[in-house]
Image: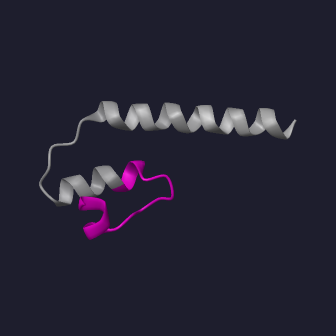
Amino acid sequence: MAAGYFGATNRYGTISLASAASQAALTWEGEAVNAIAAYHLALLQEQERLQA
């Protein structure tokens, strides 16, 4: 909800979610960002493998 209300700043949602949570006065846990980043890296690696 916070990101939808306060808007996105990047196409992956990681920075924007942290920013929106901060603007909405919500507590943000860094582990979620790390999990999203790791998942995104795995997706990029899989995409590269499929295109090879």
Q: Is residue 10 above or below residue 38?
A: below
**Compared to 34, does 13 lie above or below?**
below
Residue 7 belongs to the span the image colors magenta: yes
At x 34%, y 35%, the residue is: 32
Q: Which residues are magenta?
A: 1-16
Residue projecting furthest to the left: 25
Task: Locate the C terminus by quadrant.
Answer: top right
Please tell me how many numbered marks the rendered image carries.
Answer: 0
Which quadrant is home to the N terminus? bottom left
* Residue 2, quarter of the rendered image: bottom left
Q: How is the image coloured?
A: one colour
Looking at the image, residue 25 sits to the left or right of residue 40; the answer is left
Q: Tell me: 27 left or right of 15.
A: left
Q: Position of residue 40 (x, y in %)?
A: 55, 39
Identity of the residue drawn at 20% across and 53% down = 22
| Magenta-drawn stretch contains 9 | yes
Front residue of this view, candidates 1 and 9: 1
Q: Farthest right residue?
A: 52
- Position in image of residue 26 (x %, y %): 14, 50
Left or right, 15 with reference to 19: right
Q: Name the image quarter holding residue 8.
A: bottom left
Residue at 30% x, 61% y is: 3
Q: Where residue 36 sits: x, y (%)?
A: 44, 38
* Camera-side residue of 14 and 39: 39
